[in-house]
Amino acid sequence: MTNNVWRQGEVIEVEISDLSDTGDGVGRFEQRVVFVPDTVPGDRTLVRLVNVKPKYAQATLKEILKRSPGRIRPNCIVADKCGGCQWQHIDYNYQLIAKRNQVIQALERIGNFVNPPVDPVLVAESSLGYRNKVTYPLGISATGQVQAGYYQKGSHQLINLNQCPVQDSRFNSMLAEVKLDIQKRGWSIYNEHRHQGLIRHLGLRIGRRTGEMLLTLVVKDWKLSGIETQAQEWLERYPQLVGVSLNRNSDRTNAIFGSETRSIVGVPYLREIFAGLEFQILPDTFFQVYTETAESLLQVIQSELNLQGHEILVDAYCGIGTLTLPLAKQARQVIGLEVQSTAVQQAILNATHNEINNVTFQIGAVEKNLPNLGIVPDVVLLDPPRKGCEANVIKTLLDLKPSRIVYVSCKVSTLARDLKLLCENGLYTLNRVQPADFFPQTAHVEAAAFLARSPMD
């Protein structure tokens, strides 16, 4: 390559120095960035340019000239194909460094923070065997066998699995057997291109502390002949299985679950112990997939807030009350805001079951309900979806001026954007950011940011 011209298909030598927030290795060639999947910081590589842009290029790995000390052998035999994980070839300590760097870089680049106060990543109890929930798309092999797994990187080609090293190991004994049962029943498998066939996904969920399990089939319609008999067989075969359900999703969509779920046998929920409280969790309930790390992050939030029992706390985007209810035990009054009515129903049920009486829940969009509370909370906890907070939520917070804000984020770019808006006029100071590893072996990182109203205000 000469005269600084980027040519698609050209082979170049690149030293990998970092990892991107999508999981690719990052290197530089002639002062421009090159993204290379399946690489590790410290790798010296030969790569082929496949997507050339004026300021960067995407490339594929052709050869490793020098291996990074952070490169390890993956625990999964299909790690080089399956799109479920990006980082099984990277030593866990390197993963943690990369995730902290992601948070720092987002806060500096997007949030305009100088030397942001980012703690080391909250380390996962185990980097394998942690997922309490899996939902596998189903397919048919060339020889007509029912398959379940994840899609190959960058495609909709299904990689068939009989076990997965990042899911709770108690799922492994079921996966191959349930696929075989579906095969024997002759149930048709959904084809997304033709929008034909019945079964779309297999969902498994477990209470990490209780061991209770749910099995859910996501179907195009309810007409699944013999499901009651098969469900009873599963319930008898697997002692930890407490319920089998069907969820209907008849739309042409990438969404996994539809809006309606029917319990076939057993109970429609599992019980889980979280922060000393008992929660009921449905097949499609949002609950963090790494129970133990979620609990560790909650402990950081509780320690940082150090509630004294007289505070009013608002939990925006509260879901089923996973954070709301433990914090309510330490505050005077807590209000949970949540747009999904089914989540609020579960939150109320969980509060009643745990005899927590100082919490109320409101159904509706946070941007509509937060300005109309009629109170000024001492603390606001934000836990929005990946898109971050709506503009009116930020405006309302700047108007209400709560003493403290805790922002729990599942996407650091939107976290940085929103923190910039909250802090740019000097009303709030960013005191601490605690990243947490909810998804080992992937590029995903979560974080809790702690803001305090500035003393001069």
Image (cartoon, helix red, strand yellow):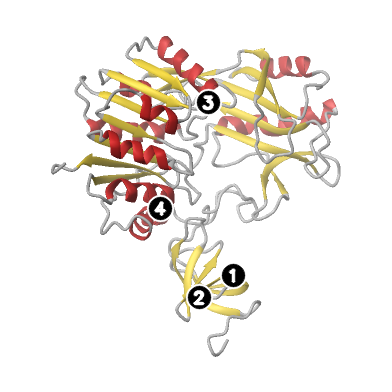
User: Mark 3 or mark 4: which is in front?
Assistant: 3
Instruction: Give the quarter of the image for residue 60.
Output: bottom right
The image shows residue 134, relative to residue 47, as above or below, that is: above
Residue 388: where, in percent of width, then height? Answer: 44, 43
Q: Residue furthest bottom?
A: 3
Task: Give the Cα separation between the discs numbered 1 and 2.
Answer: 10 Å
Q: Secondary structure at mark 3?
A: loop
Residue 281: where, in percent of width, then height? Answer: 52, 21
Residue 422: where, in percent of width, then height? Answer: 31, 45
User: Is the residue under label 2 in contact with that under label 1 (CB below 8 Å)?
Assistant: yes
User: Mark 1 or mark 3: which is in front?
Assistant: 3
User: Mark 1 or mark 2: which is in front?
Assistant: 1
Seen at 52% across and 31% down, the residue is 132
Instruction: Give the quarter of the image for residue 348.
Output: top left
Q: Secondary structure at mark 4?
A: helix
User: Is the residue under label 3 in contact with that under label 1 (CB below 8 Å)?
Assistant: no
Which of 160/385 is in front?
Answer: 385
Q: Secondary structure at mark 2?
A: strand
Which of 423/60 is in front?
Answer: 423
| Few, some or many residues within 10 Å of mark 3 (<14, 14–19, 20+) | some
Residue 374 visible here: yes
- Asked whether, in this view, residue 218 is left or right of residue 437, the answer is right
Q: Earlier along the polypeptide chain: callout 1 or callout 2?
A: 2
Q: Residue flagged by tag 1: what amino acid is it?
A: Ala
Quarter containing the C terminus: top left
Task: Give the Cα separation between the discs numbered 4 and 1.
Answer: 22 Å
Q: Residue furthest left?
A: 456
Quarter containing the N terminus: bottom right
Q: Name the residue that disc number 1 marks.
A: 59
Q: Earlier along the polypeptide chain: callout 2 or callout 3?
A: 2
The image shows residue 183, relative to residue 1, as above or below, that is: above
Q: Name the residue that disc number 2 marks.
A: 14
